[in-house]
Image (spheres, rainbow, N blue to C red):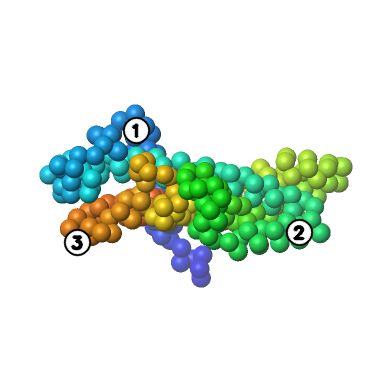
């Protein structure tokens, strides 16, 4: 009944919906990356330039998106904040994802006590939220980019370790791995040549989704003053600074909030689209 009810029109609409998610996510992420790279060479005004005489100007009164309480151009700050958010999130996910994936693949290859020990270490790390980790690191290292990257990366390690372990264990039960073991290949060789290439798609999909969480976490750290040090603008600090002026200048909170929401939505759509693209069972 289920097969007969799946008409060509329904099949086509399902395929198009999958492609729309991937296209929408790619477009949003591509736009954010383009804005971030553009901010390195051009912004309407220097993001840190203060013009007190033009403070709290609404959008289009002075600049496209107005000014903040110090007369700084909001559009320029959003563009520069895009670079700070993306660079921290991508670096943290790359570091945490690499370390976590190595741990997961190693645990799947060795099993036994080593697997149990690695997973218990990951459980301990996973028990500490990134905000708390950043506060602990900030007490020793001070706030800044390094603290934010380290806190997010440490949180990502157990996340990727668990996902990679589950995928690698499935790969180790496949016939091609059994055949590789039968001809005498070492566990390291099998992990690198056979297991990793067959689970890399799952790691990429998970990384895309975790990038959205990393951006949200970075915004939270900046909101608490644990992110990039001033005067470098970040979306989270823009939200924190706007609290006093919500009634007088609501755009100071709305605009960075929309930027964060758009970034998270883009990476989530990208991750969902990549999952559908890579998973043949959903084709």
* Disc with the residue nearer the chain's start (2 vs 1): 1
Whether residue 42 sits left or right of residue 53 in the image: it is: right
Whether residue 47 sits left or right of residue 134 in the image: it is: left
Q: Residue furthest left?
A: 61
Q: Compared with residue 60, is residue 42 higher up or lower down, i.e. above or below?
A: above
Q: Which residue is mark 2?
A: 117
* Disc with the residue nearer the chain's start (3 vs 2): 2
Whether residue 69 sits left or right of residue 143 in the image: it is: left
Name the residue located 83 percent from the left edge and 41 percent from the top edge. 185
How busy is the neighbourhood of tag 2: few (under 14 within 10 Å), some, or many (20 plus)?
A: few
Q: Is residue 124 visible?
A: yes
**What x and y, as percent, mark residue 193?**
73, 40
Q: Which residue is mark 3?
A: 247
**What x and y, as percent, mark residue 134?**
52, 54
* Real-space CA distance between mark 2 and mark 1, rounded to the nearest whole angstrom: 45 Å
How busy is the neighbourhood of tag 1: few (under 14 within 10 Å), some, or many (20 plus)?
A: some
Q: Which residue is mark 1?
A: 38
Circles 3 and 1: CB atoms closer than 8 Å: no
Q: Is residue 212 visible?
A: no
Q: Compared with residue 234, is residue 220 higher up or lower down, i.e. above or below?
A: below
Name the residue located 81 percent from the left edge and 59 percent from the top edge. 113
């Amino acid at each position: 009944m289920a097969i007969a009810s799946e008409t060509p029109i329904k099949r086509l609409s399902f395929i198009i919906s999958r492609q729309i998610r991937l296209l929408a996510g790619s477009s949003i992420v591509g736009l954010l990356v383009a804005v971030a790279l553009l901010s390195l060479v051009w912004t309407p005004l220097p993001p840190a330039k203060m013009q007190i005489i033009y403070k709290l100007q609404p959008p289009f009164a002075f600049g496209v998106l107005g000014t903040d309480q110090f007369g700084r151009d909001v559009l320029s700050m959003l563009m520069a904040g895009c670079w700070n958010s993306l660079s921290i999130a991508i670096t943290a996910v790359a570091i945490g994802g690499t370390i976590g994936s190595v741990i997961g693949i190693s645990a799947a290859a060795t099993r036994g006590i080593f697997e149990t020990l690695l997973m218990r270490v990951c459980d301990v790390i996973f028990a500490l939220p990134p905000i708390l980790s950043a506060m602990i690191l900030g007490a020793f290292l001070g706030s800044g980019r390094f603290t934010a990257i380290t806190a997010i990366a440490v949180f990502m390690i157990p996340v990727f370790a668990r996902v990679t372990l589950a995928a690698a264990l499935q790969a180790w039960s496949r016939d091609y791995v059994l055949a590789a073991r039968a001809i005498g290949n070492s566990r390291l060789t099998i992990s690198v040549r056979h297991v990793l290439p067959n689970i890399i798609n799952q790691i990429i999909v998970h990384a895309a989704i975790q990038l959205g969480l990393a951006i949200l976490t970075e915004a939270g750290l900046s909101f608490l003053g644990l992110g990039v040090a001033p005067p470098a603008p970040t979306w989270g600090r823009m939200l924190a600074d706007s609290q006093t002026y919500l009634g007088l200048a609501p755009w100071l909170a709305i605009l960075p909030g929309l930027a964060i929401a758009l970034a998270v939505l883009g990476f989530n759509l990208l991750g969902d689209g990549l999952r559908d693209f890579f998973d043949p069972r959903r084709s």
